[in-house]
Image (tube, rainbow, N blue to C red):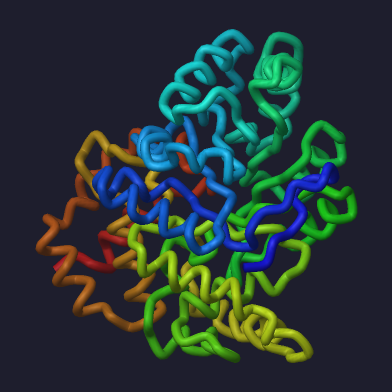
Amino acid sequence: MEYRQLTESGIKVSCVSFGGMRLPEITEEQAYKVINKALDLGINYFETAYHYGDSEVKIGKSLGKRRKDIILSTKSAYNDPITGDELKRNVEQQLKRLQTDYLDFYQMWGTDGMDVFVKMIGPGYKYEAVKDLMRQGIIKHVGITSHGKPKDVEIMIESGLFESVTIYYNAMKQEYTSVAALAQKLKMGVVAMGPLNGGFLGEETKEMSFLKRGKAKTNAEGALRFIIGNKNITTAIVGFKTEQEVIDGVFAGDFYEDIADTNDMAVITETFKGMASKMPKSICSGCNYCNPCKEGIDIPGVFKLMNNAKVYGTIDFAKTKYKKAGQKGALCSKCGLCMEKCPQKLNIIADMAEAHELLKS
């Protein structure tokens, strides 16, 4: 495992890190095994969030005495800038759930526009409270995570207020390449989320087989290798759910250097550019922030069926699955609540209508 510098102060983290978003989908016993397998194999950066279900609880129970061996990062609530007092109350709850008395990193979550950013760093709001907690030693370092426009994110990190930035970056979605380069120039850590684009890049299909370059045995390994091959990326967050997934992820982190002195990254980038005409305009990352839908629609599930049908030609399979699930896309009431919560700002209402029209029987 390679370790890269996350902060100018010298903190080093594994180039593959553990994301807690998927932990609510498994049991506490399974979480314990997956988390400790990651520790055994050298992963030392663990990332979770206030709104990741019981992720913080499972991480806290699983770490035990090994807490001191990791860099633990969690996030603020994902909503409009809350007051400093609200944030401090949240942090108190998070510390209890994580069974720790300090946080190595605290991320300013949901800073997806300049209006939110300006309010967040203003008097009485999130950032001021975090700095106070840093003075108390409760929070050691502060970072920012954003799905905002790349130029806006560059302004945010040029403020000098943060030590790391978390961006959505993978082989297909490279809009934040310039942000990563600027962050490294500013001696900030760069954390890449969405390495498989919600699982889309991990599908074992011939259409994505070009990702299997060098020693990569699977499309998922190839996609992860692409991210780690960019030295402007400090670590890639992977949402592990099984011990085997951890083993595969660490393997990708171990062998990524075979990309050196090849044009593999350029080939992958150009191949995606060539596929642009058949790619869906927007691809759901499967973050699940949009759920629960009041109409009972599995929004990420419907979008996955639609996107796979478009790219892989699995339209008959997708229609069958959609019918078995009740063809619920037709139930969309256009309330817009999901769109308010979507970090990628997808037009879910329009996309759901398109999906239903494509998949209905």
For this orientation, the residue located farthest to the front is 65
Place of residue 186 in the rendered image (x, y in percent of width and height, measured from the top left): 88, 48
Viewport quadrant of the C terminus:
bottom left
Residue at (53, 47) in percent of width and height: 46
Nearest the viewer among 339 and 194 is 194
Q: Is residue 337 visible?
A: no
On the picture, is 345 further left or further right than 62? right
Residue at (33, 39) in percent of width and height: 334
Q: Is residue 136 visible?
A: yes
Place of residue 297 in the rendered image (x, y in percent of width and height, measured from the top left): 23, 46
How many numbered circles does the render carry? 0
Nearest the viewer among 30 and 69 is 69
Place of residue 264 in the rendered image (x, y in percent of width and height, measured from the top left): 68, 87
Residue at (78, 90) in percent of width and height: 261
Quarter of image, res 109: top right
Place of residue 128 in the rendered image (x, y in percent of width and height, measured from the top left): 73, 16
On the picture, is 303 further left or further right than 9? left
Position of 168 relative to 47 (above/below): below
Position of 320 relative to 29 (above/below): below
For this orientation, the residue located farthest to the right is 185
Residue at (28, 68) in percent of width and height: 358
Viewport quadrant of the N terminus:
bottom right
Nearest the viewer among 97 and 231 is 97
Nearest the viewer among 8 and 87 is 8
